[in-house]
Image (cartoon, helix red, strand yellow):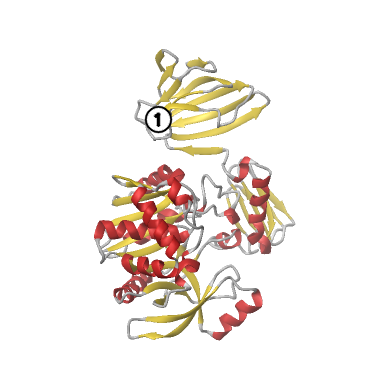
Amino acid sequence: MLVPVILSGGAGARLWPVSREAYPKPFIKLPDGQSLLRKTLARALRIEGVSRVVTVTNKEYFFITKDEYFDSGVRTDHVFILEPRARNTAPAIAMAALWAQEAHGDEAELLVLPADHLIGNGGKFPDAVRAARKLADDGLLVTFGIVPTAPETAYGYIECGPPYRSQGGHRVTRFVEKPAAAVAARLVASKKYLWNSGMFCFRATAFLEALKQCNPALHKGADACWAASKKEGEKVELDDASFSRLPDISVDYAVMEKAKNVAVVKAGFTWSDVGSWKALSELIPADKDGNRIQGDVVLADTRDSYIQSDARVVAAIGVDKMIVVDTPDALLIAARDRTQDVKQVVERLKVQNHAAHQVHRTVRRPWGTYTVLEEGPGYKIKRIVVKPKASLSLQMHHHRSEHWVVISGEAKVVNGEQELLIPPNQSTFIPAGNKHRLENPGTADLVIIEVQSGSYLGEDDIVRFDDVYGRA
């Protein structure tokens, strides 16, 4: 039984301002309109015999992930292992291995796939998986290595040892963490090293045994967390108290660099972790001046630049080797060779407690979206879209009142002791302290304009009494 395990986490800070904590890198749309997560799911399902996919993700991304899978049109058996907080790849894979062992027994094999990678020559991916499975059948922990195309400092490297029998793989001599430029150049020139892709294949029992040998504290803690976690239908909600005590450590540090039974398969496909705007821009064909654009962009005397606009017209004059990414609430301007440093901007936004590191102007919720249209002292105006048959929680605010105007659809509203059906062009006023709920009983999107007024308008001024999404 081969079970693909999709690891969908990480903020993707180097792709800010499109990637945010509440809507990270796996969900952002590439130039072809598909997300990296959707592409990863499709890749997993192309493997012969796969009928069930496990996704390990933060509990805050559960509904966004389900929507992304549903919108892909692919219908398969999904299991979601939901983390209460980020703890890196070793705890995530340990939980997936414990699930597979419990669900499918000792013969279950895992194919671990990060959700934020882009793979070309897709037909060769199943070939690499078949080679990896042969090695995994012998009890090896298998990683996938990529033939380097340049001395890249953002990737780790794997030194290939002797071939492993006739199975198409090599023993791993050692791992090299992200090296300096001069070291990377020597590694690539030697022809002995591959990029470490972060994809793996192994039996669940082989991984858990290696974890027990290499990191017994993590193994013991993972067992305790699994025993305390809530397993219900398609969801496994990991126990917060025990999961928070697990070390924040990558699988390379925790297991792969210490274990003796590690092999690498040289992949025949192209690969990128799309880790920067420079990498993402290269997915778009360049014009005669080396420029790549997305959106409504006007250029004059501009060369070798990437310019993206999500909404308004962006004009560039006399620009050379620049990255410009314009979103409704944030603008990035960077030298093309400095895109790895975008993470520094995100860190500064966090220190300043600026919302732009976390959310977009349009924020996704299990029930739909809201967009902040305008705000100022004592007021905020939102456009709220509620999906068919969805509803917000029954809630109350201490510090703000709200005025709802229905634009399209029909709203079912609880407002204090009243229950109302509000058609388009009608409204209701909700005083501070009133319990209220907004529901869409129809089959098309419900759109309303919400005008908030009060002394405090933060999103944390919500007291939930009942919620179909378990947030009360």
Say if 440 sits above or below 323 in the image.
Answer: above
Q: Name the spot of residue 251 as percent of width and height, x first.
A: 46, 65
Q: Name the spot of residue 108 as percent of width and height, x first.
A: 28, 64
Residue 6 seen in render: no
Q: Which residue is mark 1?
A: 467
Say if 440 sits above or below 154 in the image.
Answer: above
Q: The C terminus appears in which quarter of the rendering? A: top left
Q: Name the spot of residue 266 as percent of width and height, x first.
A: 42, 77
Q: Nearer the viewer, residue 339 or 232?
A: 232
Q: Is residue 255 left or right of residue 179?
A: left
Rendered residue at 62%/30% (across/down): 374
Rendered residue at 51%/84% (across/down): 192
Q: Is residue 130 left or right of residue 368?
A: left
Q: Nearer the viewer, residue 406 or 343?
A: 343
Rendered residue at 64%/44% (across/down): 330
The quarter of the picture where residue 206 lies is: bottom left
Q: Name the spot of residue 51 as percent of width and height, x first.
A: 26, 57
Rendered residue at 29%/74% (across/down): 137
Residue type, label 1: Asp
